[in-house]
Image (cartoon, rainbow, N blue to C red):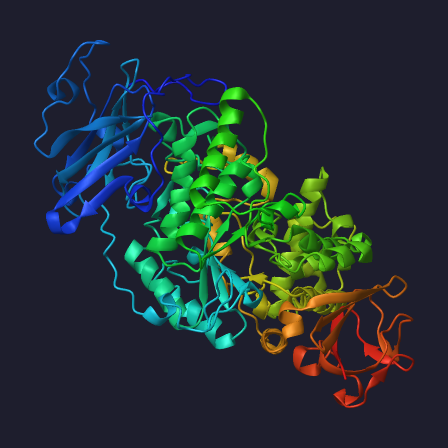
Amino acid sequence: MKITTDYSINNQRAYNYNTKPAFKRNWAEHVSWGAKYIKEAGKADFKLFTFPDAKRVFVEIGKKAENKFGNLWEKIVKLIAIQGAAFSIENVLAENEDTSVHELENKGEGIFETKSIPAEENSQYRFIIVTADNQVNLVKDPYSKQQPDIKGWSEIYNPNNYEWKNTDWLEGKDPRRIIRKPEEPLRGLENLIIEEINIPTISEEGTFESAKQHIDKIAEKGVATAIEILPVENTFSKQWGYDGVDKFAVNGNLGTSAELKDLIDYAHSKGLNVIMDMVPNHMGTDGDFLAKTGPYENGSGEFGSNLNYEGLNNRYVRDWMANAALWWANEYKVDGIRFDMTKLCNSDYLLKQIVAEVNEHNPKVFLIAEDGRDNLNKVTQYNKFEMTHDNELAMIDQGVDNIAHKRFNSDPGDIGFDSEWDFNLMHALKDPISAPYKLNLDIIDSTIWNSKYRTKFALSHDEIGNWDGTRLVAKAMVPELNLDKRVKGSNIGEIGQNAAKLSQWLIEKLITGELDGMGLEELHRQAKSIGLKDNEHLSPKRIKTAFETSKAKQKLCMGTVMTVPGPKMYFQGDDEMDMSTFKFFREFSEEKENRLKQDPETFKLYKQKGYDTLEEIARPQSMLGRIKSKDTGYIQEMKSYMKDLSNLVKSTPALLKGEIKSTIKDYTHKVHAHILSDGNEEYMVIKNFGDKFHSKEYGVADFPDGEWVEIFNGDDKKYGGSGYINNDRLTTITKNNQGLNLAPNSILILRKI
């Protein structure tokens, strides 16, 4: 069976379909795509966007779900047609008692649909497309909401498969819920403290049902107000989520759609908002049938096929992705949606359309972009002028039409996401951790000034999984022990990977107690097998000192994130200083037997990341809590640190949503301070990025007028510090008589009296 031609932007057919007006984007159309099941009638409607010059389209339906038709290619159709000649359904399909075939009516613009076709819940179906050049494509539904096999038939989905329990949350009566625009009793985005979670690695089972145990722990710790679930778009295996090929269907390896709804409902019952991560910028490379379905794609990118948002015949491709966002918002009752690397969509018009559609139909759901364009203001700004929803969509269509047909570049203006990931602040904090010479107070200062509406974080899954798999403490250990100068490697990348591996190995040996029972000779023998140069030696005492310093640096980074107003985020386990690695992991449907040397793509990833990404190897190494520490004291210290700090932030409007009033940059001592205000309340956050301890001697010339009292000290003994708090928080600190205790890599918060 021949596959249709590539429909990339440079090789698309120029269709002439100006005979019918564009379809209206009312709610009925939004929910009409794919297979729309009407349980009471025992029927389903089917609607597909395909090639605008396709000759005919059919839907084939399996009468019984238990037939499990499987791979799309197992039932090959026979086409006995000549272009322009009439042909009947018998010409298209061989006889098959197990299925029925129904032709879809051509509605124009590449839209084909049929209604009231007998069907049952979980019945399997596929679309059969006869192209203009008489090729026959067997494809799954691009709107498939239940897809057991990424290369198989779609299944009829029953949207009434779950009865929501926490109706107060859904009806806006629970004051813990966070929405786009705060209204009584609901709160705004400044209340977001997000924990990023990956379903396959927060429990041994790696399922939606077993994830409830972690939800319980999050609620018990009382730090996070929201969880962000890494994508669960359907793929072949359990993975970290960014290779989805069925944008509406849940990854069946993690559980059913009803079980995901139950997990979201359960999180709501614990007072946690739920953010769903979705991927609008590419298709995964395994199980992608879009090129055979219609003009959905526009060439290939680094991570898979790019999507045709601004090429020819783009209208219903943009609608498809906007409808995916509406689907997660409506069907799964999520409170927010995070969009993966939006700049790689290469279409601000698409982004604006998604924002417009969700704001119109789900006005309480907030939207967060991972954009990566150096905090481009337009990403989180709205147009200054008012227009109706229909007019805004018309403006978007016209702008894209100018690009696709007239090659006239235009810009949609402000996009209007509610927040975006603050990469600038992350780099300002992370880069000095891995390379202390990169500490730049000016960059830290400018990012803090401009971070209020952005989502702040020290490390996300990307900075861990894409950069050698290690967390912040392990990254900090590398320069503390000069490992990048002491390990083998033929290039910078290999040296960095070996340094990271050795750092992680040392941490694991240290916290499990194995280091204490290991002689120097054995220590060096094993370290050299990981990459330590033959002439280098490691001191157990120095390893322990470096570990203490690295832990302090993580607290400092997390403390900085927590004390800048606006949304904040951390990765699973970072609130209790989990030392387990988190690695990029996935498995393709035909990859099981293709190991590193046989599979060029996996080998490339291994060279890039420094570890095997196959699910059966990388996933076990990424399990939260994998490393069992002999002494859990530092875990309790970190938990106390984060809980006390989050409670302070939640109860202090200036730290929650205040304005930056001024900042102080002390280049000599590597200290930065930011002063916040909210009404008459004023607070100062002092952050020591230096390695010097100031015992009742720290002062700075620009200290603000007035008297100040300490309300939080990261160097408190209960957080694992030295305990040199400032006068037991009782004596005030004046402009001319500061004399502060300030520990290295620590944070201090003062309140103005």
Q: Is residue 537 visible?
A: no
Q: Is residue 705 left or right of residue 297?
A: right
Q: Is residue 666 visible?
A: yes
Q: Residue at x 38, y 38 (%)?
A: 320
Instruction: Work out whether 705 lies above or below 671.
Output: below
Residue 638 percent across, percent down from the top left: 62, 73
Q: Residue at x 60, y 53 (%)?
A: 421
Q: Residue at x 12, y 51 (%)?
A: 40
State the residue in front, 303 or 600: 303
Residue 9 percent across, percent down from the top left: 49, 22
State the residue in front, 732 or 175: 175
Residue 285 percent across, percent down from the top left: 44, 34
Query: Where's the C terminus, which quadrant?
Result: bottom right
Query: Where's the N terminus, which quadrant?
Result: top left
Instruction: Work out whether 187 lies above or below 445.
Output: below
Residue 281 percent across, percent down from the top left: 50, 39
